[in-house]
Structures are given as structure tokens and as C-alpha cells.
Amino acid sequence: MQFVHSEEQQMIRASARSLLESYDSSRLRAALEAPGGYEAALWQQLASELGWCGLAIPEDDGGAGLGWVELCILQEELGRRLVASPFFATVALGASLVRECAGAAQRRELFTRIAAGGLRLACALAGADGRPPPEGVAVTLQSRAGGLVLSGVSDFVIHAGSAELLLVLARGEEPQELSLLMLPPASAGVSIEPHVMLDLTRPMSRVTFNDVQLGEDALLGSRAEAAAGIGRALDRARIALAAEALGGAERVLEMTTEYAKQRIQFGRAIGSFQALKHRLADMMTEVEAARSAAWYAACVADEAPQELAEAAAIAKSYCCDAFYNCAAGAIQLHGGIGFTWEHDAHLYFKRARASATLLGSPAWQRERLLRALGLGAAATPVF
Amino acid sequence: MQLGFTAAEERFRSEAAQWLAAQLAGPFRDLRGESSLSGRLERRMAWERALGAARFSCIGWPQEFGGRDATLAEQVIFAEEYARAGAPWRIGHLGIELAGPTILAFGTQAQKARFLLPIARGEEFWCQGYSEPNAGSDLANVRTRAELTQGAAGPEWLINGQKIWTSLAQFADWSFVVCRTEEGSRGHRGLSYLLVPMRQSGVTVRPIRQMTGEAEFNETFFADARTAADNVVGAVGDGWRIAMGTLAFERGVSTLGQQMSFRNELDAIIEAARANGLIDDPAIRQRLAHAHIGLKLMRYSALRMLSNAQEGRLANEAYTYKIFWATWRRKLGELAADVLGPRGEIAAGSPYEWELLPRLFLGSRADTIYGGTNQIQRNIIAERALGLPREPRGG
């Protein structure tokens, strides 16, 4: 039992932090205006040169063979800088679905391409109401002579506009049957409409499938086993998202602490007033508990599959709540400047809100947790 | 990062589990699940002696002082198995968790030889003499005085003053007392950390009745109380540093045991919610989930703290742990009251006796006060961990 990062893991963090040191507000804002909403040069660097996309992919498939603990360190560091990047959609979400659902040959092929150069994936999982799958999945898959037909709408698809491959969750002819499919976004019958989202750093689109014709080889793995695999993949993604939220929470705490030390009012640094100190102390208390939650969950993903659902629900709900509270505190404690477009506080606040919503809200995670613990179900639905 | 245990550690787990199960099914079955602070005292003291005889009392201590030189992982395992077995709350904890580790870290060889074994064997019990009526949050404002005099058997300290909130003082054999040993000194300077025998005519213990109706705390009066001159830990005048060292030990493995009694309280709330149907109520469910999550996070944070301590680091989570658990448990008390509803406001007996959950509701108001109030915790976090400017101090 050793619940601290090893030296190697600390080195991964140090090199990620140093790489992202220069990813400041102006680079972030330039990225938001760039095609696809991310900085191509940085993506190229971390995907092709540094091998970040293959970090948690087995060595046999061209990856570095490390685990979710290491991947979550990168997520934390990306979260600290609010980096706008297809990394989460591709690696945390997409590669997890491949890992859990694809057959051996498909997995090897996709892993190799992801690890080699960051084949960008987008995952069409949610229905129009955005509830976490499998609830609300509104894309259907039908078998017709000579192949498969995909139709319906999936919304809140992250980085769909710049993806090279779409993974799509679809309902089969039997209501409980779920399938995962892959197809190029340029396939005939696929249309992608980007939204203007609250969170400017994680672009999302509505993807419509209008009788898209596919071969059997578009199926990832077997239909029968898809549901359990999708559940595990989503939990891995939730853990990665929790790590990212932890990074964001930690960073806004640092920014606000720094500001409170420098900003003078009434002839003293505002950080000398207990009203601010105590709010900052509460923020730090949440950040430290979030760190325990996220780190533990990352270990569980590598070591203790039987705890995965519980650890993911805990980490996702707690870390996203903590990030939200810290980002809200950052705006409040910065005063007027914190409410401006120019200051980055709102970018963190919006990321915090959107991360909380993504893949099931904190309240939804808590309800799910109680169900998993055998404590019945709420009398009314929880969103 | 690694959560699992080795085969040798798992063997230790089964050894500990078997011993605990046999004791709590056999000679100590009456103590299973005992969660009061000091109820059934004689039996509890017998239990401490049984743990000591099996060298399960202070497993992390060196063998020569009654321990097993246990690794961190083994200590974690033992805390888990202790709780799983439903073993009683440790009445010896002030000696085991505070006095003992302080003497181990700062004491002389002679002090270690004199004091550690009786603690590990459950033969001597301790209480803590820190707070005073005018030294609560401002702990450095200690007024209790000690002066070196010539006694019948050699030089000794003569102690005069009053301590307060001394839990378990009514049966303790010894107390570790922060005293002012330099006349005219103020604040952190001029304090010393003395070990004082409680069973002497110069020491009077008077219980304090709390808002729960129980009397778990005491006032302790020292009127020409005596202790031998060499019963000072660290240098004379260096008591503040030693006392602060003791507080750091409070964040040790024992937190894992504390969490298990919290688990029992949460389980009792869940039972009550099942019984009256509130288990289906979405708002109550959210609070139950928050409680479950908070408890898990305490465990994860304790594991982090222990892993860091093993590498000689006091990391950030050590600053935030106290306020986190105290605030969590106070909320748990409120959840208990809300789940019980009006029935929870009827006492279990006269004159003012309460069952577990109403007692939790009332008792948890103290959690955010003792051991450093939430306000003081926030100041400490802000100043020491975040580096914000210090509070102005009065003259």
C-alpha cells in the first residue's frame, strides 16, 4: 500500500507541467478561435512527439503501457491550464470505449493509430436531452439486406467537428440491445452541427445520422457485450474528467491566493482579511479532498475493477463540485475584474459547470452510487 | 501508487483478524460495538491489557517498548480489522496516540524506559493537559505555572493552575501538561511539557456536564501538585514545540479507526431511513450519498497522509483533515435529526439520556470546536498552507 505517486509518476507530472507552462491565457484564447477549437501545434506535439495519446495503451499496440494513474496526471495538468484539446475525447473517452468494447483485431488497429499520432476520435453517446448513456440513446441500428443502417440524433458530441473517426452508441431492434459503431464523420448521411457552448474550451456538436449505410465491420465488438463494456469505459472517462476538474480547481485556488496576496485595499493585502482567508481555506479543503478522490479512483481503474463504479461516481461528483465551488470562489474573491471577459476566471467557471454536467451530473452520480450500494432508488428521477 | 497489500501483509491481516474475532466472541463479547467514550470502564481497561499482552496495542512502536515495529501497511490493516471486528473504542488512546509517540520522538532513554511499556501494556492511562479557561484557541496563553523546587526525594516541579476539557482525567494515571516554567514569559516562550502523576493530593478532577447531558470532560485543578524534575519532555522552555509535535501525531492511523465509528453512525441513519420510508426521498438520498462520499474521502485522505508521513512529509491534506471530518460529522448529526423527525426529540430516559443518533446530533456540535475550532483551522490553513498574511496579534 503506497498512496503517493512514485518518482516516475512525479517526473511525468513535472514534464507535463513544464510543457504547458507557456500555455497562457493568450494561447488559450487563440486556440478557441482556431479551426476545431484547439491549437494544432500543441496537439501535434503531445500526440506525435511526446506519445501522450499512447501513454495508457499497451506496449504491444504501440503505446507506453502505463496506466490510468499516469493518464490522470496528464489530465490534471491539462485541466490546470484549461487546455482546449481533443485529448479527453480521444484518449479518455474514445480509447476507453475501444479498450472495453472492441474485438482484439479492431482494438489493435485503433490503438496503434491512436498511439502513433493521435487519431482523433469523437464519441456520439448521449441523446438530445444529454442524459448519460444508456438513458436517452436516440440513435437506432437496423439490419437490412447487405448491411446496417444508422439513424437518429446524438447531441453533446465533444470535438465532433475535428474528429477523424466517430464512435456511435446505438440502440438495436431489441430495446435493451446496445451497439457501438465506428464510422468516418464524412460518411454519407452524417451531418454535424456545432453549438455555441457555455464552456468555450470544449466544443460540442449535434450529430444527425440520416439512414447511414454501414457494413458489419463498422460494429465494435459484439452487440451482446457492449452494454457492460460501455459502462466501464464511461467510468474510466469519468475518472479522467475528475482528474481534469481537480487540476482546474487547484489552479483557480492558486490564482486566487496569489491575487489575495497582491491586491491592496484598506491599506492591506485583502488576503489578510479573515473573510477571504476563510473562503480560501474552504477552497483548499475541497481541493485536497478532491485530490484524494481523483487519485484513489485512478488507482482503482488500474488495480481494483470491482470498485470502479463506486470510485468513479465518488470522484466525478466530488471533483466536479469542488471545481465549481472553487471557480465560483475565484470570481467572487477577484471582485469586479473576476466578472470580466478579459480575466480567465469565467473560463474556469464555465468549464467547471460543463464538466459537472458531462457524463452525469454530481446529483446523478450520487443517486447512482446509492443504487449501487443497494439503497433502493429515488421516488423521482434525478438529473 | 499502489493500493494492494503483499502476501506477508495479508498473513498479518488474518492473524490479527483471528485474534480479534476470538477475543470478541469469547472473553470480551460484552464489549463488541461499545462506542461510548468511557462507559464500562473496568472492562475497557481489561480489554486494553489484553491487547497489550498480545502486542496488538501499539503495533507501530519498537519491539522493546511493547510494539511490533509494524509497517505502515500493517498499521492500516490492523485499524481496518479492529473496526471490522466491532472492537470497542480505545480508552487508552491519549497515551497510545499522543503521550507515547511524543515520548518516542522527543523523550530521553530513561523516559522511554519508564513510560512506554506501561502504555503499550494497558497498565497506565493518560490524559491531556493543554487547554485552560483562558487558553482555548489561544493555546499559547497558558497560565498554569510550574517551578523547580527541592522536594523530599530530590528536585521536583511544583505545579499550580487549572486545565479544562481534560477528557478521561477521572481515571488517568498520568497527564501531559503544558506549563509556564519561566516566570514573566509570554506566548510560546517559557513553556515546558511536563509528565505529571494524576493520583496525588495536589490534583483535583471535577466533571463538566455538557449539552448532551453527559460528563465526558473535566476540569483539572493543580494545587501544589508535584512531579519529579526529570519528567520534562524536551528542554525546559521548549514545551510549545513538543506540544505542537503531539498535535501532529493526532493525524495518525487512529483516524482510520475513528472512521469506522462514523460508519456505524451512518449505517444507523440508513436503517432509520429505511424504517420510516425516507430512504426513497430524493433530498435525503442526496445527503446520504454526500455522507457516504465524505466518509470514503476521509479514508483516502488518511491513506495519503500516512503514505506521506512514512516518507517524512507533512502534506497539504494533513492541514485540511480536521476541518473536513469535523464539518462532515456535524452535518451527519443534522442528517440524523432530519431522518428521525419528531421522534428524535424524545429522550430515551431520565434525566436526559439519548440514544445513538440524537446523541450524535448533539455531540457533533463539539467536533468543530475541540482540537482547534473550524475558525482556527481556517486561519491555520490560510496562513501556513496557503501563505496568506498572519492575523494581527494583540500586545
Image (cartoon, coloured by chain):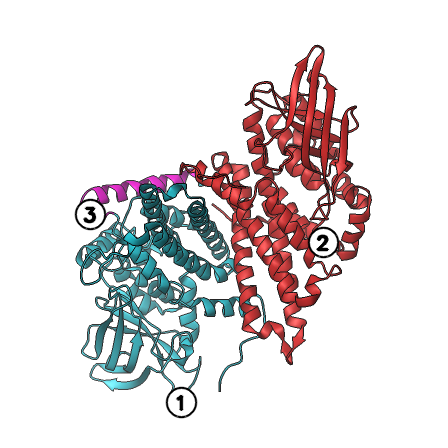
Chain colours: A red, B cyan
Viewer-proximal residue among A158 and B301: A158
Residue at x 20% of width, y 84% of height:
B152
B389 versus B67 height, above or below: below
Residue A381 x %, y %:
50, 38
Q: For the magenta stretch, what is the residue range?
A: B6-32
The dot on residue A18 is: 2
Amino acid under label 3? Phe
Distance, label 3 to label 1, CA atoms, is 52 Å
Q: CA distance from mark 3 to mark 2?
A: 58 Å
CB atoms of marks 3 and 2 within 8 Å: no
Amino acid type for the residue under numbered disc 1: Gly
Residue B28: assigned label = 3
**Chain of the residue on which disc 2 is drawn:** A
B31 or A375, nearer to the observer: A375
The one of B262 and A347 positioned closer to us in this rendering: A347
| Mark 1 surroundings within 10 Å by alpha-carbon count, few (fewer than 14), some (14 through 19), many (20 or more) | few
Evaluate whether residue B25 shows in this view: yes
Q: Which residue is mark 1?
A: B184
Please give left or right for residue A203 compared with residue A285 in the image: right
Q: Name the chain under label 1.
A: B
